[in-house]
Image (cartoon, grey):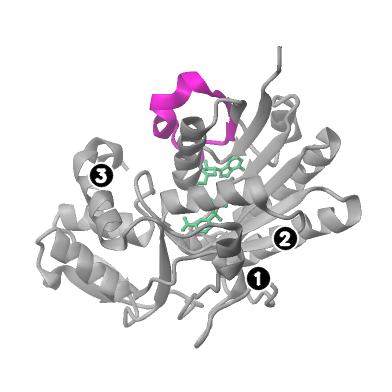
Amino acid sequence: METKKTILITGGAGFIGSNFVKYMLERYSEFRIIVLDKLAYAGRLENLEDVISQITFIKGDVCNKEDIEKIGSCDIIFNFAAETHVDKSISDPGLFLKTDIFGTYSLLEYAKKQKVEKFIQISTDEVYGSIKEGSFREGDGLEPSSPYSASKASADLLVGAYHKTYNLPVLITRSSNNFGPYQYPEKLIPLFITNALEDKPLPVYGDGLNVRDWLYVLDNCSAIDLVFQKGKFGEIYNIGTGLEKTNLEITELILKKLEKPQTLIQFVDDRLGHDRRYSLEFSKIKELGWKPTYDFEKAIGDTINWYKNNKQWWKSL
Ligand SMILES: NC(=O)c1ccc[n+]([C@@H]2O[C@H](COP(=O)([O-])OP(=O)(O)OC[C@H]3O[C@@H](n4cnc5c(N)ncnc54)[C@H](O)[C@@H]3O)[C@@H](O)[C@H]2O)c1
């Protein structure tokens, strides 16, 4: 009898991680999936409620060797586990250094011992920093602005070093801003949807003209899956859509779709070190055969409906 390969998904109870767990379960039957998640505030077991019987869930910290040992053996690792909120990284940088850097190091050591087939590091476009014109390519230098993006950039460098030094079969994805169901309402889109639903003000940083490239979470899942299937070891893959919108445009769109007054917009003091524009060149992943398939307007409409229909999920937060 053929034994199933084991996939470890760290941070699988969070926003992208839980979407990815479900994405993989729908597409593959040949893997056994283990989720390791600390259940920090953004990680919630209820995000995996409907699939919990199909996976092995371990409540544990990627920084803790004993927790990692509970995993046993494993063949493939997707590392989503991270502290992810930029504002929180400004008030508490140490936690980000610990989870995002030391946590990645602990997993790399485990991967090395296990002689895993693949180690996929989930990174972010924020590691490149801000760009006025044009778009960042994978080989461009790293100029992170926040303790969050600096921690993620450090983790990327470590992952690259484990490839060069130990020949660990690593792959790195750097995606733009995700949106979709199960995103903790501290990030712009879910915060503004839930505030608007409760007729609360929508706090827009600075002049609201910061530009982000927006990616529906399931498009990111298909891109990560493709990198897992076809990516070349040691390589980095940008994942974006080219759909660049200012925060103000997103805010106005949410209010329009929810038929709420634009007067709910409240401009507040800008975030410290706030990057003006993120932009990715993503021809490398297109060459692997990926393109975003979700229409932005429809995906944002579906996301709004999800928050409308799942008030019990966010009301208590
Ligand atoms: N959300 C985005 O727009 C975006 C964009 C690009 C890259 N990313 C990256 O994708 C990954 C997932 O992001 P997300 O938006 O789903 O974040 P999230 O905050 O929703 O989820 C992070 C998950 O990691 C878990 N976690 C935190 N610390 C841990 C620890 N020490 N040990 C084990 N688990 C721990 C949390 O409990 C949570 O389930 C992150 O690595 C992030 O940097 C996110």
Q: Which residue is mark 3?
A: 306
The N terminus - image quarter:
top right
Residue 12 position in % (x across, y down): 53, 38
Front of the two marks 3 and 1: 1
Which amino acid, mark 2?
A: Glu
Question: Which residue occupies 70% across, 18% down?
Answer: 3
Provide residue 177's location: percent of width, then percent of height.
45, 62
Which residue matches tag 1?
138
Query: Of the residues under marks 3 and 1, which one precedes in the sequence?
Result: 1
Residue 124 visible in this rendered orientation of the protein? no
Identify the secondary structure beneath mark 1.
loop
| Label pair 2/1, CB-CB below 8 angstroms | yes
User: Is residue 41 found inside the magenta-colored segment of the image?
Assistant: yes
Q: Earlier in the sequence, mark 3 or mark 2?
A: 2
Q: CA distance from mark 3 to mark 2?
A: 35 Å
Which of 271/15 is in front? 15
Q: Would you say residue 42 sits in the magenta stretch?
A: yes
Q: Which residues are magenta?
A: 35-58
Identify the residue at image location x=52%, y=55%. 84
Point 56% across, 41% down: residue: 11
